[in-house]
Amino acid sequence: MLGAVILGAGLSRRMGSEKLLLPIGRKRILEKTIDGVAESFGDVIVIVTRNAILGSIETGKGLIYLVNDQPELGQSTSLKIAVAYLAKHYPECQGILVFLGDQPLVSRKLVGQIEQAIMKNPTSIIMPEYKGQKGHPVAFGKCWFKELLTVSGDAGGRGIIKEHTEALIKIQGDRTCVMDADTPEDYRRLLEYYEKEWSENEN
């Protein structure tokens, strides 16, 4: 099995307000991200902040919420919480698939391709790419867990990827793997894409 993790404990500094609680369709951004990941995975780990997120979103079965009390120290803190939990509670886990909470429209087809790639190449790192941009979700085989537990700052696993390019397998993604909501402009583009490509399918 693979551990599916959603990183949702950012501080939303560039947005100016909690971006994961902004609406998209009938739900909030983080809720829609969770719904999409849960379509492909049974148990989903969601890393959140205690005050800004927890208690503000719909919760469902099969979701494991873990609180990051030090989000100011960067994305690496969330990643380490997730990896440590998987290592302790799911020893059979063969790797981790890392989603970003502000990417609610990631293609399910792409997720399946990344999952297949990491299972076939368990010592690799799988990353989607779109027009030269690095995307998410990113998959790390279990052999990287020890190193993931040492990362620091806001780079998350990017430092490991940079240091171990020989282990990196890139997959051609689509626009959704690089669409996030870091800024108001990003959010506007996300909503425009959703209204054009997604909303009709949900009605």
Image (cartoon, rainbow, N blue to C red):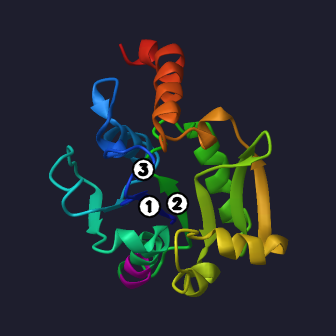
Q: Is mark 3 on a helix, strand or loop?
A: loop
Quadrant that contains the C terminus:
top left
Q: Which of pointers 3 and 1 indicates the residue nearer the eye? A: 3
Measuring from the top left, give residue 123's x and y in whole percent. 71, 75
The x and y percentages for residue 8 are: 38, 56
Place residue 163 in its image quadrant: bottom right
Say which element carries label 1. Answer: strand
Left or right of residue 203, residue 37 in this image: right
Q: Residues within 10 Å of mark 3 (few under 14, many from 20)?
A: many
Q: How crowded is mark 1: few (under 14 residues within 10 Å), some or many (20 or more)?
A: many
Q: Label 1 near label 2: C-beta < 8 Å?
A: yes
In the foreground, 59 or 102: 102
Q: Say if residue 122 shows up in the picture.
A: no
Q: Which of marks 3 and 1 is nearer the N terminus?
A: 1
What is the CA distance from the residue labelled 2 to the residue labelled 1?
5 Å
Residue ID for mark 2: 98
Name the quadrant containing residue 7. Answer: bottom left
Disc 2 residue crowd, few under 14, some 14–19, many 20+, Cα 10 Å: many
The residue labelled by disc 3 is: 101
User: Is 7 within the magenta?
Assistant: no
The residue positioned 59% from the left and 46% from the top of the image is: 111
Q: Name the residue under label 1.
A: 5
N-term mark: 2 or 1? 1
At a point 34% along the width and 23% down the height, the residue shown is 25
Kindly identify the residue that appears in the image at 45 percent across and 48 percent down.
Answer: 14
**Residue 112 relative to residue 19: left or right:** right
The three-letter code of the residue at mark 3 reads Gly
Look at the image and give the residue range highlighted in magenta: 84-88
Q: Residue 96 carries which label?
A: none
Residue 132 horizontal/vertical position (percent): 80, 45
The amino acid beneath tag 2 is Val
